[in-house]
Image (cartoon, coloured by chain):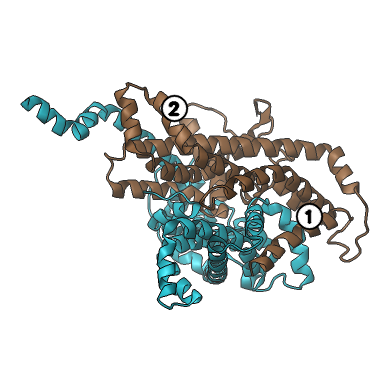
Chain colours: A cyan, B brown
């Protein structure tokens, strides 16, 4: 009797743990191995940015740097107009996120709440845009912007990114509005005399913060990272974004002596999206309708 | 407002169809002449195009398959023992695993070029392991594996690297929503780890996995930042894929009419999958 009671109390946590410790060790080892693989290029980016030049001239660079020099992280700012590129990117990201998320929030809300004729059709059209390979739009969208005289202007990038971002964010937010909280709250507010817009502003948006965050993050990282389109329509020095700017200087810094400097620039460009995702990881899967419980 | 933005998305496609029927070129703006279906005939009879189309399919399928296996594997590894690993630790490892997914393509492409280079770190490692001659991962078209040149495989490897975190992200979230009792019941019945995965885990994450595979495939078929920066299609088209090819035709050779036609063909190939996806998603509660 006593033995049965003790085992019943102990077993759920302790017994499986002791029995599976070998397997658990393997699981961790596997996960760590994959993590090393994931971080391998980033590790090399960082150590190349800090190691002495003499080590780079060796036929094979060693996997552990022999010394650490931090001056590249200072020098890169004067070697290329990195600050200006970052500012340009930040402006593009900010405009795209602000317009994209607010338009998508209203659109997504309308699609999730109101049964109007054509609702399903519009939804299908929005969904369909997600499945158009971006490269298909390359040529026609370029000619469109060209004819409008917008190539190499400050508005070209935010406009094109917004066109891409709105359907995407609309879907994310529609899914979120439908599942995240009950409609009763909104009905209650309406009964208490709140306007439709008031409901949106006071009830829906505050409750949807994780969904809005998720959409904003996905758009922000896309706009920060995007390269090819930006290199086509915003190649001018004064409006160049980080990806294009960094690419421009690969040629100049291709030699080994300048490699650390380029890698130092790469660190600054890669850090914002990585930090954002590590810090706000829990919002990301929200965006795809897979909520963690 | 949504309608206006939809117009912005669909008008270019219609415009692409119009352009594809002309000999439009950025060299002679405004002087395009209708040429009927000539561009499409040119595509169908171009040997270069068919090589590239084949490479595109291999690039998309192989990198998505590799990414799916690796991503699901690490998701299972991290969540199946989740009671043992402190939550904070899991969040940090999970966050760091996303780095390849969010790192700017410019940064990851050039870092991989450096890693792959003749006197680079990977060759250094191989050298200490006893490989005498350096391997030119992105340049050696003479070495073939399964009939495909080495550079394409090297590019696929980078595709796997940059794609697996997305699979990890999606399946990890789906896995944590599986009730623990199911796995406990399987353990009591004495099911092996593989059997449990095949009969319980996989069917339950299948819907999420399907959507993820679909989105990734489209992304690989149509996306071009990574291949463009990594090899630009070279050497000698050995790693050229559809997206990069459209860019080269439309913007390097300035043959926008032909480029648009290539885009329309790609669009038509993706459309049936897209319709499947739209029908499927509309029946679900969540948007995705």
Q: Is residue A265 visible?
A: no
Q: Subunit of mark 1?
A: B
**Looking at the image, which residue is at 60% across and 56% down?**
A250
Foreground: B248 or B268?
A: B268
Q: Give the SS element for disc 1.
A: helix
Q: Label for residue A192?
A: none
Label 1 – label 2 distance at C-alpha: 49 Å
Q: Subunit of mark 2?
A: B
Foreground: A15 or A91?
A: A15
Report x, y in % for residue A274: 45, 56
- For the N terminus of chain A, the quadrant is top left
**Looking at the image, which residue is at 62% across and 58% down?**
A227
Residue A85 placement: quadrant: bottom right
Report x, y in % for residue B59: 64, 38
Q: Is residue B163 visible?
A: yes
Foreground: A196 or A227?
A: A196
Q: Which residue is mark 2?
A: B199
Give the residue at the far front of this rendering: A191
Q: Give the SS element for disc 2.
A: helix
Callout 1 touching callout 2 (CB < 8 Å): no
**Looking at the image, which residue is at 54% across and 27% down?**
B132
Would residue A110 be found to the left or right of residue B221 on screen? Answer: left
Q: Which residue is mark 1?
A: B250
Are there few (<14), some (14-19), or many (20+) residues within 10 Å of tag 1?
many
Report x, y in % for residue A289: 48, 51
């Amino acid at each position: 009797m006593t033995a049965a009671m003790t085992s019943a109390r102990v077993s759920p946590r302790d017994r499986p743990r002791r029995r599976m410790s070998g397997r658990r060790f393997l699981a961790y080892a596997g996960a760590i191995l994959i993590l090393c693989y994931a971080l391998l290029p980033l590790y090399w980016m960082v150590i190349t940015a800090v190691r002495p030049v003499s080590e780079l001239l060796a036929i094979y660079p060693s996997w552990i740097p022999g010394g650490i020099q931090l001056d590249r992280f200072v020098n890169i700012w004067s070697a290329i107009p990195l600050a200006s590129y970052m500012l340009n990117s930040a402006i593009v990201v900010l405009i795209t996120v602000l317009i994209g998320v607010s338009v998508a929030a209203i659109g997504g809300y309308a699609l999730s709440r109101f049964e109007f004729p054509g609702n399903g059709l519009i939804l299908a059209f929005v969904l369909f845009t997600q499945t158009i390979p971006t490269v298909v739009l390359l040529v026609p969208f370029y000619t469109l912007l060209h004819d409008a005289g917008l190539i190499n202007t400050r508005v070209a990038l935010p406009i094109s990114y917004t066109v891409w971002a709105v359907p995407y964010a609309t879907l994310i937010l529609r899914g979120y509005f439908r599942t995240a909280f009950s409609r009763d709250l909104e009905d209650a507010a309406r009964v208490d005399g709140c306007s439709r817009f008031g409901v949106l502003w006071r009830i829906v948006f505050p409750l949807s913060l994780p969904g809005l965050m998720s959409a904003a993050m996905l758009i922000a990282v896309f706009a920060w990272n995007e390269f090819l389109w930006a290199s086509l329509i915003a190649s001018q020095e004064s409006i160049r974004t980080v990806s294009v700017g960094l690419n421009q200087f690969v040629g100049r810094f291709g030699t080994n002596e300048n490699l650390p400097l380029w890698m130092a620039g790469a660190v600054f460009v890669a850090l914002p999206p990585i930090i954002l995702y590590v810090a706000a990881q829990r919002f990301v899967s929200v965006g795809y309708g897979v909520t963690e419980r | 407002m949504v309608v206006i933005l939809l117009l912005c998305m669909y008008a270019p496609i219609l415009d692409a169809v119009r352009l594809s029927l002309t000999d439009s070129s950025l060299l002679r703006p405004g002087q395009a002449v209708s040429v009927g279906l000539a561009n499409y005939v040119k595509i169908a009879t171009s040997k270069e195009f068919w090589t590239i189309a084949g490479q595109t399919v291999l690039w998309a399928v192989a990198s998505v398959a590799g990414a799916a296996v690796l991503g699901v594997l690490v998701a299972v590894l991290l969540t199946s023992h989740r009671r043992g690993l402190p939550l904070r630790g899991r969040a940090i490892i999970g966050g760091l695993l996303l780095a390849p997914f969010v790192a700017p393509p410019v940064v990851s492409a050039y870092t991989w070029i450096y890693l792959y280079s003749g006197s680079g770190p990977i060759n250094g490692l191989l050298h200490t392991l006893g490989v005498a001659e350096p391997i030119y991962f992105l340049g050696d078209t003479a070495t073939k594996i399964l009939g495909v040149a080495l550079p394409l495989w090297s590019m696929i490897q980078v595709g796997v690297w940059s794609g697996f975190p997305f699979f990890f992200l999606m399946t990890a979230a789906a896995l944590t929503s599986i009730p623990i009792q199911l796995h406990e019941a399987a353990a009591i019945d004495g099911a092996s780890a593989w059997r449990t995965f095949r009969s319980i885990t996989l069917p339950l994450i299948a819907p999420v996995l399907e959507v993820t595979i679909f989105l990734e495939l489209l992304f690989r078929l149509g996306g071009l930042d990574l291949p463009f920066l990594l090899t630009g299609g070279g050497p000698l088209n050995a790693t050229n894929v559809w997206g990069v090819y459209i860019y080269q035709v439309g913007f390097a050779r300035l043959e926008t009419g032909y480029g648009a036609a290539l885009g329309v063909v790609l669009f038509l190939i993706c459309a049936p999958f897209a319709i499947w996806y739209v029908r499927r998603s509309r029946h679900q509660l969540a948007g995705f």
